[in-house]
Image: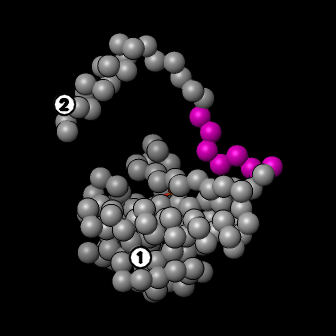
Amino acid sequence: MKDSNCIFCKIAAGEIPSKTVYEDEKFRVVMDLGAASEGHALIIPKNHYANLMELDEETAAGVLPLAGKISRAMMKGLKCDGLNLVQNNGEEAGQTVMHFHLHVIPRYKGGAEVIEWKPGSPTAEEMEAAASRIKAEL
Ligand code: 5GP
Ligand code: ZN
């Protein structure tokens, strides 16, 4: 369940030192080396899953409660004004480390933008067509 070439496997296992804020049997939560804001953390499962599509359901079920726990601690401890959860899958989506991780990014009034997109304006037909293609695979 580990990939010997994967840096996040090594970080999660404690083989590469990291600023750890939380650890249990399944997860390690560390400070991001390239933090987008003060306190930016990464929730990393100890087992190797390349992305969300590969994540097993039991691990997946642990991620959001842990994100909630870390978020509550950030709101109190960092006095941030909000936070974003970000989870990239695939190079095209900005994933650079191919071991599933969830970013927990504290946000501060007046701080830098973290996630931005320009809202589009799909037609009803376009939305229906996209929805049908997804539904066909469920
Ligand atoms: P991604 O772009 O894959 O969603 O995010 C990868 C994140 O991992 C980036 O925000 C990057 O700053 C962080 N990162 C990359 N290498 C290391 C490392 O060795 N240690 C830590 N703590 N963070 C890392
Ligand atoms: Zn890994």
Helix, strand, or loop for circle 2?
loop
Q: Residues within 10 Å of mark 1 (few under 14, many from 20)?
A: some
Which residue is located at x 52 percent, y 53 percent?
Answer: 86
- Left or right: 8 as drawn, with respect to 81: left
Q: Residues within 10 Å of mark 2 (few under 14, many from 20)?
A: few
Q: Which residues are magenta?
A: 110-117
Where residue 135 sits, quadrant-wise, is top left
Query: Ligand 2: does it lie within 8 Å of the C-beta at label 1?
Result: no
For mark 1, what is the residue? 27
Q: Which mark is residue 136?
A: 2
Looking at the picture, how far across and down is residue 11, in whole percent? Answer: 47, 78
Where residue 116 sits, quadrant-wise, is top right
The image shows residue 122, relative to residue 82, as above or below, that is: above
User: Is residue 95 visible from the viewing direction of this image?
Assistant: no
The residue type indicated by label 2 comes to Ala
The image shows residue 96, relative to residue 1, as above or below, that is: above
Looking at the picture, how far across and down is residue 94, in whole percent? Answer: 50, 48
Say which of 113 and 57 sits in front: 57
- Left or right: 75 as drawn, with respect to 93: right
**Residue 65 drawn in magenta:** no
